[in-house]
Image (cartoon, rainbow, N blue to C red):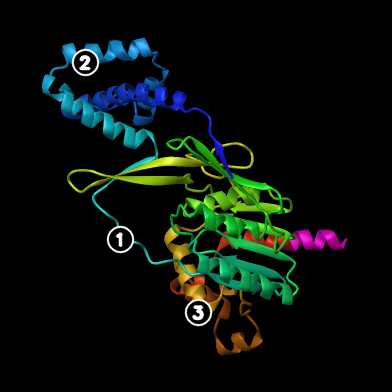
Amino acid sequence: MILPCRPAANKLDGLKRSRTAVLIALTCSACSVCFGQSPTASPNETHTLVNTLAPSEIDQAVRALKSNFVQPDALKDEEISRATLEGLLQRLRGGVLLLPGKESVPAPAPFYSDVLANHIGYARAGSFTNERVAELDKALANFATRRVDAVVLDLRASTVSSEFEIAAEMAKRFVPKGKTMWTLHDTAAHQDQVFTNDRDPAFSGTTIALIDADTSGAAEAVAAAMKAKPQTLLIGQPSAGRAVRYSDFPLASGKILRVAVAEVIGPDGKSIFPGGVKPDLVVEQISLAQKRQIFAQSMQRGMAPFVFEPERPHFNEAALIAGTNPELENRQQRRTSEENLHDPVLQHAVDVITSLAVFRER
């Protein structure tokens, strides 16, 4: 559904004011660097101070810089324009990107599904493509035949994507029919595209979505829709805050200016950009590199080895006679082997589902 959007004049006015503000912030930083002096305020403190200036104070500060700075060449129009662009790239936090040229298209992340503990369906979405939607449907059908009573949707392996139409198809498998999932607010086109579920969900039971800093773009829209769904929890770390649609503007040198021209508004009416989606349960996780290693290995080994602790050998009479200590040997092996990899985020999801099952049986 396409709706006319609200005027964006307030955003444009803010952008104009920020042009001068970023110039002041960058020039103040440059002064300390040029003369080898320690800054009187950290970058974060400078950012905060600049934001507290009234418009008249910003103009006053710029005039003072132009009239008194010891290196006048640093404040020529060209340098001011460079400082403005550099500052906007920093302040807009992923809303504007300057790329050296056209990027190669990354290989699609694979879909993966599994059944954990005989009753928990696990689906890792991977890239947002029509093929992945079909694989999700196949996995959900398999879960139904195996009497799965809870599903974990893992959004931590989704590559950066603006495929919001495909994301909507994935979300429809879980969100109640008739519910608004999100709105794509397009500033340039002056219209809103509303994504509403027009079908019955394939699974309506207990659902947990896993998110972290790798959850970006269209995957964040799905996370926001899932968070508003009954019987659903989000577990992990805040998402990337890149739930936007970009347009590329080629520059004369071949470089690319990538600008966010549309943003996702969640079902709660709040924009996901740039703050991201916050989990209901925050879990400190392993490094992103280790997580990606787990995902790669799971394609052959499954996810169970990274969630459930294998039974450990114990010190017994036979070990005493043999003069060995199987507990110590096991610990030493785990320090030096890939078996030490563990996914605490998925572990927490399994624990929550198990606790809910026990509670319902009481």
Residue picked out by circle 2: 65
Q: Quadrant of the N terminus?
A: top right
> Main structural element of the magenta stretch: helix, strand or loop?
helix
Percent coordinates x, y for residue 78 in the rendering:
16, 28
Which residue is at 53% across, 54% downward? 165
Residue picked out by circle 1: 104
Which is closer to the viewer, label 3 or label 1?
1
Determine the image quadrant of residue 144: bottom right
Which residue is at 61% across, 56% downward? 171
Amino acid carrying mark 3 in the image: Gln
Question: Where is 236 relative to 112, above or below?
Answer: above
Residue picked out by circle 3: 300
Percent coordinates x, y for residue 319 in the rendering:
60, 86
Percent coordinates x, y for residue 51 in the rendering:
40, 21
- How many other residues sit within 10 Å of disc 2, few (<14), some (14-19) or many (≥20)? some
Where does the magenta region start and end? Answer: 354-362
